[in-house]
Amino acid sequence: MAKKYFGTDGIRGKVGDHPITADFWLKLGWAAGKVFANENHDIVLVGKDTRISGYMFESALEAGLTAAGVDTHLLGPMPTPGIAYLTRTLRAKAGIVISASHNPYYDNGVKFFSVQGTKLPDEIEEEIERYIDSPMTTVESAGLGKAKRVDDAAGRYIEFCKASVPTKLDFEGLRVIVDCAQGATYHIAPHVFSEIGAEVVAIGVEPNGLNINENCGATKPQKLAETVLAYRADIGIALDGDGDRLIMVDHKGEIVDGDELVYIIAKSKLEAKELSGPVVGTLMTNLGMEIALKKLGVKLLRAQVGDRYVMELLLENKGILGGEGSGHIICLDKTTTGDGIISALQVMAEMQNSGRTLHELKSGMTKYPQVLLNVKTKVKPDLNSDLIQNAVKDVEKKLGDTGRVLLRASGTEPLIRVMVEGQYEDKVTAYAEQLAEQVRKLTGA
């Protein structure tokens, strides 16, 4: 059945607009509690990022879970991957994350992790939705849930992150700038990198509830690049508001995106004979990464856009590494979900093992120019129509084997996304504009 509230990555929207309201989240907490409750008073973990509305939604979820007879363990500000880890190691019935990830402070959202530290299957989300749309009840007073704070949550996750790289590696002398995006990693990431021996300069570590992701972090790494140059640092690490994205900066101030980082990790694992299965990217993964991996004898599979789909394809094909250009990187040999800190540690470990700079490590992959244009449409067009497909084939013929074309309808807006990729930027730009204009004409834009 089609889900009413849950999207591909939980529920997300503007605070105050349904369903991102306190009354809905009270009902959501109760509904989740009804799904996860049993006679043993199993626990559910609740963590959040640093946006101001987190206080309100944390309280609403706690009240709903309590009414359903579930004990709530409150983690406070914690990265999304940290909540996934703690859900698994504390053997909680589920983990709930209050976060809108890379969105601005006035948005918020919720997503769930299973006891295995993975996203919930569709059937569980559908069961939660059925309870949301049913009358709310309260268990007998003797069966009400209790709530408590988990005081050592941050310390547990810090130790887990550090354990993802060998203790024999010496990071002393490595100067690292860490941008925590004024988000959930502000009290965790600097400790992880300093405790493995690196010299750390932390920025984006003064959250006030309103500045999360504001001109900082993985979505806007320009300030990080400037800081790397100013401090003559070896690398910069940019995380997003909930810590599941990673973008890095090399010592020259050049931004290294998720595609390049996945390539670096893949090559490292291949050389260490630790890579199994294909690498998984998305429809938007740069063609340069596919070509570079092919030279290594590594197959790239492309999933739909979204880390959920990357994960699904990894599991189907018994792979351990996948990611997106935006910085969602999944290392299944280390953890169960995308994790910015752990991904950064894998890159740093390769730097130390190889004795090469990040700039040198990324040089094995040449990114192809990629132009993405959004075409507004009046009606939802048929992208498989002969007229549109003929226009696509015309551009593909001009690109030959050194480029590709992708048309994709937005799932949330009346937009067609036109992407053209190839060796030469001027040609790619011209072809993209040509195709976008044809799409406008054919869709009545």
Image (cartoon, rainbow, N blue to C red):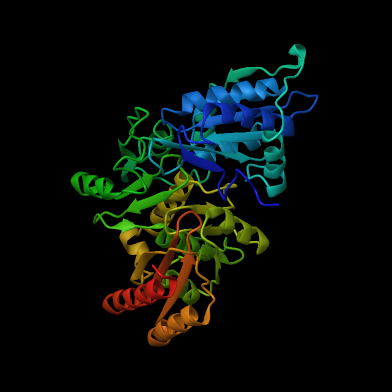
Which quarter shows the C terminus?
bottom left
Residue 94: image x %, image y %? Answer: 66, 35
The residue shown at (34%, 74%) is: 437
Front residue of this view, candidates 381 and 182? 381
Q: How many marks?
A: 0
Q: Quadrant of residue 319?
A: bottom right
Q: Quadrant of residue 179?
A: top left
Front residue of this view, candidates 151 and 99? 99
The residue shown at (62%, 32%) is: 28
Extreme residue toward the top, this view: 142
Front residue of this view, candidates 168 and 246? 246
The residue shown at (66%, 20%) is: 66
Q: Quadrant of residue 177?
A: top left
Q: Is residue 427 above or below residue 274?
A: below
Position of 43 with respect to 343 (left or right) is: right
Q: Is residue 7 above or below residue 256?
A: above
Residue 330: image x %, image y %? Answer: 53, 53
Q: Is residue 262 visible?
A: yes
The residue shown at (57%, 26%) is: 23
Front residue of this view, candidates 382 and 334? 382
Q: Is residue 292 visible?
A: no
Residue 42: image x %, image y %? Answer: 72, 27
Extreme residue toward the left, this view: 230
Position of 75 with respect to 317 (left or right) is: left
Residue 232: image x %, image y %? Answer: 21, 48
